[in-house]
Image (tube, rainbow, N blue to C red):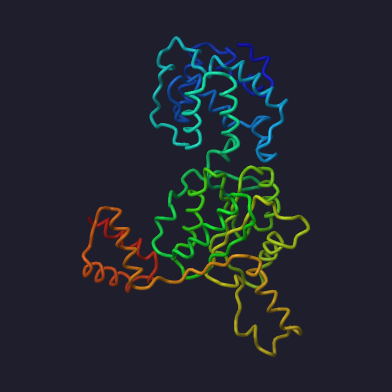
Amino acid sequence: MNLQRLIIFRNLLDEEIFTGAADKFAIMARLIEKAEQLGLSGNLYRSYLIYLLAHEPNLVSTSIEINDGLIGDNLRESFLHDVEILLPILRSEMLSDFDLLNHYKPTVENKDESFRELMKKLSKRIDSKSISKTFIKHWKKFGYGDIATYRAFRWDKNSIVGIRHFETIRLDDLIGYTHQKKLLKDNTTAFVNGKPANNVLLVGTRGTGKSSSVKALVNEYYSQGLRLVQITKPQLKSLPDLMEMLRKFSGKRFIIFLDDISFEESEAEYKYLKSAIEGGVESRPENVLIYATSNRRHLIRETWRDRHDWQEEVHRDDSTNETISLSDRFGLIIHYHAPTQEEYLEIIRSMLNKNGIEFDNETLRLEGLRWEMSHSGRNGRTAQQFVNHYLGQQ
């Protein structure tokens, strides 16, 4: 292979594994190190090359993201040219004198769903055109780099950082709240399909599954391009910067997640949120929505003193409108109420059944209500704590 002829994948010229600039023992050490770090298996020349092509940004993958899946004919031809050069590796024709590198099994296999799917599809493709199409479909569906690898991110110093150990919860794992989950799913389905959708405020009693519902959405819609980015209240000043970054990934849909948020009237952060949702000079990216959870319906703390006639505010209605204007910017407000006693017991029953444990009705009622009375009330969190306690004693 003459890698100097590469057009799109010039970054491979920095990889001694493929250029032959290192001796065979150095290459062996490098490949085994990468295999263990990344969970690569089989022919390590091929596996590592596919990993680099899938994860490292290149002109084709970035163009697909910026242009919402579009790729020009000439760029496609340039990409095909590079694939033809790399074909011997992609077909596993490049073998090592060390048989270990041709049939490697890492300690822990790569668990990245998108990468495993790509490897499986490429195992059935042998010509350059079908391999090129497979990569392009992969980038359209999952993106590249961390956007493809992670479902959720946190905003940190003007960049998004992937959350490696994200919860695997699904909506079906949440007992009850059928109407609330339907509202949430319908809005999110419209969003990932490119249809009009609303920012969402989930409000209600603590421990009722508001945050879990939002996290579950990402697991439900990951393969359809949905990602989550969590941001904290002190970071709201940089919300426009985050939105501008996410605008560049037009092929994906992002939920900016504000968890358990509320404001004092003296805090200025809520004004940044108001402006970002609606009313700023620059429009919100069409691939971004804001989902927030709170125990307060209006998000901004109010007191009865605020309503007294003797308060210093001359135009009292203006002050009241300012207080409620933030929550009004969420087009969909979903209320999560505390479960009834029967719903609470049914949550416990379902959690126990998933662990192979069954209580008779009387024991379930006795133990579940006893736990509720000695803890923070009747909700899904209390139910989970009871189940954790019971399982820990077995």
Residue farthest to the right, as pictured: 281
Number of dots carrying numbers: 0
Residue farthest to the bottom, as pictured: 309
Residue 332: image location, x then y, percent: 59, 65
Locate residue 310 relative to residue 54 in the image: left or right. Answer: right
* Among the 4 quarters of the image, the one containing residue 313: bottom right
Residue 191: image location, x then y, percent: 60, 53
Residue 151: image location, x then y, percent: 52, 45
In this view, the residue in front, 47 or 385, is 47
Q: Is residue 147 above or below residue 302?
A: above
Identified at 67% across, 24% down, the residue is 8
Q: Is residue 143 above or below residue 259?
A: above
Residue 244: image location, x then y, percent: 70, 48
Locate residue 31 relative to residue 100 in the image: left or right. Answer: right
* Among the 4 quarters of the image, the one containing residue 345: bottom left
Indicate the quadrant containing the C terminus: top left, top right, bottom left or bottom right: bottom left
Identified at 44% across, 33% down, the residue is 110
Q: Is residue 111 above or below residue 332?
A: above
Indicate the quadrant containing the N terminus: top left, top right, bottom left or bottom right: top right
Residue farthest to the top, as pictured: 97
